[in-house]
Structures are given as structure tokens and as C-alpha cells.
Image (spheres, rainbow, N blue to C red):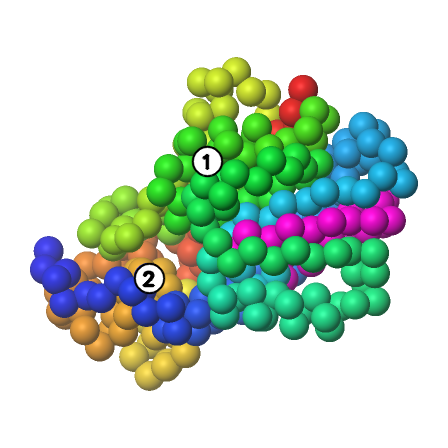
Amino acid sequence: MDTKSLQSLLSDPSHYAKAFKVFCARSDKLRVFSDWVDGVFSEAVVGKLQATLDGQEELRVLGVGSGSGEQDCVMLEQLKKRFSLVNNRVVEPSDKMLVQYKALAQYKTHELQGVECDFRQQTLEQYQKAGDATKFHFISAVHCMYYLDDYDSSLEYLYNCLIPGGAILVILKSENNGWNRFLDRFPELRRGGCEITSADIRNSLDRRGIPYTQYHQPNGLDVTKCFDETADEDSLLVDFLTHSVNFKETAPEDVQRSMMEYLASSDCSKRENNTILLNIDWDAVVIIKQ
């Protein structure tokens, strides 16, 4: 299949940000995550930390690949209900994302009272090489492991950054995720990123004998309008799903037809009335250090 004309989405940070924004809006990503934090996260992470630590002690938090901070802030608000002081260190390579995170934290000053933020514009690999010896009570890696050079050694490093009784939250696509099946079918779209799933994290932990608990979160993305030639905004959604810049404008017709047909197939999506819902289920892996 001739895909040489396709430009990787990761090569254009500005276009990536636009496409990602559409993906987040269409998948109702923040609401689904907020509901999960109110339920599972509150019990499986916050409750466990409170049982281990003195509630008056400063809680040290590390956010890895936190992006613009929306999901981090949801978790921080939940942590603030149990811990009065939180030191929140953020490791994020994108300067633009950090600017947005800082603006969001400023906007949420009241909700995040008692949270002190320490922003580091670094990749996790750069942060590791800097040799900071700080240990953390809680580490979050939400949908960021895909972009690490070596997720296996990075996971081991993060585990070693925990204090005993501390927790790591890793969120990734489920191995049965329809979007992941789509990318498996067309591996040429995986340019510039390691498309791992929660199964890879579980295998890494099992190999090291590290216990964990996994929580599955069903989720669907309405991709119906992706098949509408006139929907400009949905062209951005197609770009995000195919990891390409201007997919509809640059992909050969036979490539578009083959890929879009498979995206709509029962391997990847389900149909409800006249709606096509792409399976974007994710899994949360919670690791409590013994």
C-alpha cells in the first residue's frame, strides 16, 4: 500500500495540537476521566495513599507527559480532598503544553489551594539523566508511555522513584481497543511512536514480579462524520486517528478507501442506529509499591 505521501502527525506539533483537541472533544475524554477519578481513582489510589501516609504530610506528586494539565488537575483536586499540601512536579517536553498547564493551574487557584507546582520542560529521559533523587508518593503517566523511547526501562525507573507505599497510575489503550486494531492492520501509520497497550505494561510488571491492579474503562468515539467529505473538523479527527497530516487531502484514493472501510468494520467499531462508534477502550494499571 502506497503511503509515502502521508506526513507523520508527530512531525507537525501545531497540527497535532489541533487534531488532538478535536479528538478530546469528540471522545468526551475529560468527562469520562473525571467520572473515573471520582470513583475508581478515589478508592484505588487516594484511599490507599491516605491509609499509608499521614494526611498532614506534604504529598509529593510526579506527572509524566502531563500535556496541558486537564487530567492532572482533576487528580490533584481529588488528592487535595485528603492531603492539605501537595508538591506537584510536572515533566512535559512541550513548551506550548506547559504554558497551557500553567494557565489552567492559575485559573484553578481556588480548587488547587495548597498545591505547589514545579514545571520541568523535559522528556522523561532527560529528567532521568539529570539525576534528581526525589522520591514521590504518587506518579501519573496518563496516555504518555506511547511516546517514550523505552517504556520498559522507564517503567522500572518510575517504580524506583516511588517511596514504599506509593502508587503509580499508568493509563493506556486496551489491547482489544478498536483503534489499536486499526493501527495493527496498517503498521505504516505508526511512524514515530511505539504503540504499546496495557498488555505490554502488565507483561513488564509480571516479568519483574511487581503486583498491580488493572481497571478497564469502556469508551466509544463517534466517527460517523469522518466518512462525510464535507466535514472539515472531522478531517482533523481522521488525521489524529491515522497519525497523519491532511490525510483526506494527501492519501491516495485506494489507501483512503481501504483504511476507512476497515475503521468502520466490526473489528474496530460498532454501529448503533446510524452512528459508527470506534472502540477506544482504555485500561488503568495501578501499582502500589510494597
Question: In the visual, does 136 lie left or right of 84?
Answer: left
Circle 1 — which element?
Answer: helix
Q: What is the quadrant of the C terminus in the image? A: top right
Task: Using the image as rendered, state which of residue 256 and residue 127 is in the foreground.
Answer: 127
> Does the magenta segment cover residue 71?
yes
Chain part drawn in magenta: 70-92
Q: Residue at x 79, y 67 (%)?
A: 109
Residue position marked by numbered label 2 in the rendering? 10
- Structural crowding at the residue carrying mark 1, measured as other residues with C-alpha within 10 Å and reported as few (<14), some (14–19) or many (≥20): some
Where is residue 81? Give x, y as percent.
85, 49
Query: Which residue occupies the extreme left position in the image?
Result: 2
- As measured in the structure, the alpha-carbon distance from the residue carrying label 2 to the one carrying label 1 is 21 Å
- The x and y percentages for residue 160 are 57, 28
Q: Is residue 225 above or below residue 2?
A: below
- The one nearer the camera, 233 or 105, is 105
Q: Which residue is mark 1?
A: 154
Say whether disc 2 or disc 1 marks the residue closer to the N-terminus.
2
* Residue in view at x 63 percent, y 62 percent: 70
**Amino acid type of the residue that numbered disc 1 sits on in the rendered structure:** Ser
Q: Residue sitting at 71 percent across and 36 percent down? A: 137
> What amino acid is at disc 2?
Leu
Q: Is residue 25 above or below residue 139?
A: below
